[in-house]
Amino acid sequence: MRIPTKLIAKLVLCFMPAIAWAAGKEITVWAWDPNFNIAIMKEAAERYKADHPDVKFKIVDFAKADVEQKLLTNLASGVTKALPDIVLIEDYNAQKYLQSFPGSFADLTKEIDYKNFAPYKVSLMTVNKKVYGIPFDTGVTGLFYRRDILEKAGYSEDDLKDLTWDRFIEIGKAVKEKTGTYMMSLDPNDSGILRIMMHSANSWFFDDKGHPALDSNPVLAESMSTVQKLFASGIVRPSNSWADWVSTFNQGEVATVTTGVWIIGSVKSVADQSGKWGVAPIPKLNIAGATHASNLGGSSWYVMNSSKAKKEAIDFLKTVYAGDTDFYQDILVQHGAVGTYLPSQTGPAYSTKDPFFGGQAEFLSFSEWLKNVPALNFGLYTYEVGDALVAQVPGLLQGGSVEQALKNAQRQAASLVQ
């Protein structure tokens, strides 16, 4: 029997969606850090493929600087063919990409229930009331401290409650005098401690129009003054690199570490320090509006509008990163990743008492502090302004005035962001 040509055409049209579905789509992801972001994304992909075997993933591991450079180059040139479907962007840089390249990232406002995420993460990816991206890990901060060293100096965890930076310095002087151990380590060329202090007081480096506002910012003045007092007090062991900084607490040279939750893996890397550590809220500034909650670092996932697998990419992120609480339990246990998906933080992995931290459920503490991190807009030039500020630190260490340092930083920052 001869089948009419028109009937064949109708059959083909009828089965085309099924044929296309059967062929599947490939989702390409750009990220950095093979032991953290890449490993976690691979686990997320495996979870999704269990119910979507037709979807393939190509997860590409670049250096962080390469991801940022490739993304910037392709977006600036307007050539979107080489872009991935999903890209990881550090939170400090999110507004730079979103505002500099409008229309390049998928608007997910109506796709995701953002009430389930930490508010401060959502604000970082919001432009004109539209939300782009899926919040991922947090850099919620804590004061990691050596119980044994503080006890030797006559202090306990009760002395760390409602702690101010001035009280921290007082305790640090006593610890240095009685034990010979520095209270903390800081790299004078790193603006991280300034960002922690600023964020904890709900303030940043820019005015409402996005211009640097350094010499008229009381929170920044208080933060710079505090950094100056920390170094002048003799309780800081200066460090000159990431490796040097990590070695100061791994080798027991310092009694405390103030940074993001992501440092836990490095803290716990020295097995014979098990049971000697604890974690408390960070000290707060002596200024109105200051809190004990802050953040350092963190990143989030974004879908490119140019993606040929945009629908699948959004569904993947929505299904796993915005809906799978078991996934977040697993990545906390396997990788120490504290996500910002709030429904996941009542699971057993968060309430487990950790012998390394003296039986403290440290992740439960961090998940509570996470809810109090102020929501900020980081603007477009956080790192550029950070460089201008740390350039003034040597002068402060020589006894220079904070007022003059901020005037100098203002001029330098204004020239950098023109």
Image (cartoon, rainbow, N blue to C red):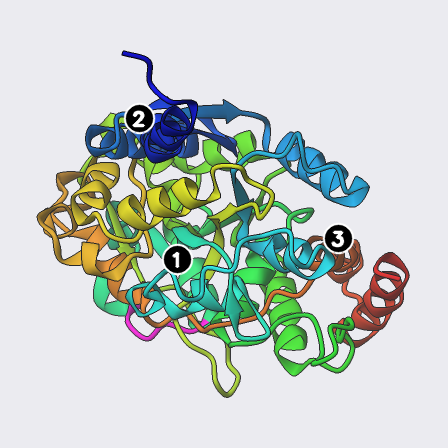
Mark sitting earlier along the chain (3/2): 2
For the N terminus, the image quarter is top left
Amino acid type of the residue that numbered disc 1 sits on in the rendered structure? Val
Q: Categorize mark 2 by other alpha carbons within 10 Å: few (<14), some (14-19), many (20+).
A: few
Residue with the mark numbered 2 = 54
User: What residue do we see at 26% from left, 32% from top?
Assistant: 52
* Quadrant housing residue 251: top left
Viewer can see residue 233: no
**Res. 140 mark:** 1
Give yes or no for residue 163 being in the magenta stretch. yes
* Quadrant housing residue 342: bottom left
Q: Is residue 168 above or below residue 3?
A: below
Give the left or right position of residue 5, taking residue 325 as reference.
right
Amino acid type of the residue that numbered disc 3 sits on in the rendered structure? Asp
Specify the segment rendered in magenta: 160-164
Of badges 1 and 2, the one in the foreground is 2
Q: Nearer the viewer, residue 188 or 159?
A: 188
